[in-house]
Amino acid sequence: LLAAQSCRRCQRLRPQLPRRWHSVLIVQPLRRKLRGHRDSVPPERQLAEARALVKSIDGWSVSGCFSVNMKQRTQWVFTSGVYSQLASQVRRSEATAVFVNVAMLSGMQSYNLSAEWRRPVLDRYSVVLQAFNDRATSRESKLQIQLAEIPLRLARTAVVSPES
């Protein structure tokens, strides 16, 4: 029993990619365009790239895609109305993970969303690391992936640690 509890505690500190397979729900945040600025990549192309990224990992599939408005620099990522609509979609879906197509979620954002949805919440950084990890063959490439995981682990550990 004690070993099982300590193993569960360790699972929280690891990146949230415990399974060999996932059915992934992709959430594509839409940002408002600032006056005078052009968006370099249209949302449709970003969503297509996210689908291709998920499908490139062996055993992973896309269960659905949503485009939603994004609220930057908050602990929930989305506005309350969008969040409640998205939460109901996530609960009804058969997805085993949710991929929010942003560069990197903060530890607090990832923790809040995964606790609320009871599914791993992934960002581009963690999905790309998983894709590289699946294809790494040499010791050097595996070591580079472990080094690249350090910022991800630090962000997640700071939220889970009892001192914070």
Image: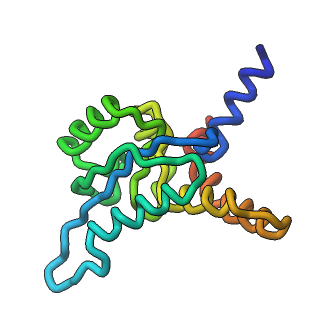
What is the quadrant of residue 126 in the picture? Answer: bottom right
Q: Nearer the viewer, residue 9 or 61?
A: 61
Residue 54 lies left or right of residue 131; in this view the side is: left
Q: Which residue in the rendered view is the most extreme toward the top?
A: 1
Residue at 62% across, 36% down: 12
Spot occupied by residue 97 in the image (x, y as percentages of width and height): 47, 41
Number of marks in the image? 0
Residue at 24% across, 53% down: 68
Q: Nearer the viewer, residue 77 or 24?
A: 24
Spot occupied by residue 38 in the image (x, y as percentages of width and height): 22, 83
Quadrant (top left, top right, bottom left, bottom right) of the C terminus: top right
Q: Which residue in the rendered view is the most extreme toward the right?
A: 139
Quadrant (top left, top right, bottom left, bottom right) of the N terminus: top right
Residue 73 lies left or right of residue 144; in this view the side is: left
Spot occupied by residue 8 in the image (x, y as percentages of width and height): 68, 28
Is 120 above or below relative to 37?
above
Is 22 above or below relative to 56?
above
Q: Which residue in the rendered view is the most extreme toward the bottom?
A: 36
Residue at 26% across, 57% down: 70
What is the quadrant of residue 129 in the picture? Answer: bottom right
Q: Specify how the rendered protein is coloured.
A: rainbow
Spot occupied by residue 23 in the image (x, y as percentages of width and height): 47, 41
What is the quadrant of residue 135 in the picture? Answer: bottom right
Residue 136 lies left or right of residue 68; in this view the side is: right
Residue at 26% across, 56% down: 71
